[in-house]
Image (spheres, helix red, strand yellow):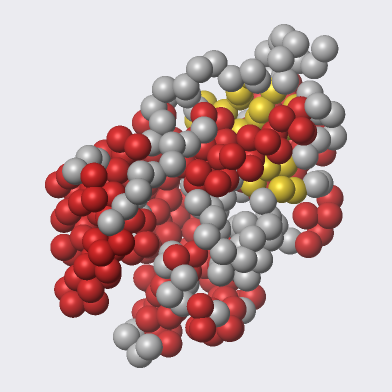
Amino acid sequence: MTGDRPILIVIAGPTASGKTKLAIDIAEFYATEIISADSRQCYRELTIGTAKPSPEELSSVPHHFINSHSITEHFSAGQFAEQSSTLLTALFKKNKVVVAVGGTGLYIKALTEGFDEMPELDAAIRIQLNQLYDQEGLAPIQKIVAESDPVFYDQVDKNNRARLIRAAEVILSTGKPYSSFRIEKVKDPYFTELKIVIDWPRELLYERINLRVDLMMNEGLLQEVESLLPFKEHNALKTVGYTELFEYLEGKFTLPEAVEKIKQHSRNYAKRQLTWFRNQGNYSFVDPAETLALLKYRVNLK
């Protein structure tokens, strides 16, 4: 890949695919910096359950949007789009290559294409949706989103209460699909993109996911979740790995059952991540054994 334009290497993939290590290896090779496009690793309070880079990894290469916000702050994809775009411009002033890494497809899209802010919404609708959830669970909210916005419903984590309520809120407030407010086409960016997805065989990926969950539990994920009990209603915590352990602490499951649910929901999430990236049409799916060599030598720096 040649040319005078700066290059953004995007390393994407499902959970537990090895994105963090590859991003660091590539950033060290090009002596550059990393932008994290992960919707949870930005929160200081979430460490084990988000598979955040270790202190040693963070010290080896400059990282951005890791530990940058608190779960008590509102931080949307739109805000990430604005802040990461400004940062990327600054990084390209001193680096020919910048690395972005993450499994949150929407955040990668926000970084590379921008993001439409949502319209003004009726606060009463959110109250009604939360009451509906308290009375009947997620099923009726899932139904609203599935029937009115099948495109978004195919991509979203079906157990993510916050995102489903948000989508239903937009749908009911505007009469339009939630996905219609997300940018589909943008002008050609000023930089060149090289986007890859680390693509493991399904059986191996699922083994890696199961092992990661076991390692998280051994590292103290339950204790991390216990420390976050006062904040469990915050949107950042309505996600895989935290939701299941909150439910265990509420007596809904035994601990082994909760761990199995984390593994199952993580595998389900990985499948949705891969579907999302395939549907984008501009990612190269690369065997894990080939990713490092490909990214080192496809970029020709002048």
| The N terminus: image quadrant | top right
**Left or right of 145: which side holds 18?**
right
The residue depicted at 85 percent of the width and 34 percent of the height is 31
How many labels, in total? 0
- Farthest-out residue, bottom: 251
Q: Position of residue 81 (x, y in %)?
A: 56, 40
Answer above or below: position of 119 versus 98: below
Nearest to the observer: residue 15 or residue 129:
129
Answer above or below: position of 209 versus 119: below
- Farthest-out residue, top: 3
Nearest to the observer: residue 38 or residue 94:
94
Q: Position of residue 84 (x, y in %)?
A: 64, 40
**Left or right of 177: which side holds 245?**
right
Q: Quadrant of residue 134?
A: bottom left
The residue depicted at 35 percent of the width and 44 percent of the height is 119
Q: Position of residue 243 (x, y in %)?
A: 41, 72
Q: Quadrant of residue 259?
A: bottom left
> Can residue 140 be seen in the rendering of this structure?
yes
> Can residue 287 be seen in the rendering of this structure?
no
The residue depicted at 72 percent of the width and 9 percent of the height is 3
**Left or right of 113: which side holds 87?**
right
Q: Position of residue 55 (x, y in %)?
A: 78, 62
Answer above or below: position of 2 versus 255: above
**Left or right of 37: which side holds 65?**
right
Answer above or below: position of 71 versus 300: below
The residue depicted at 68 percent of the width and 42 percent of the height is 35
| The C terminus: image quadrant | top right
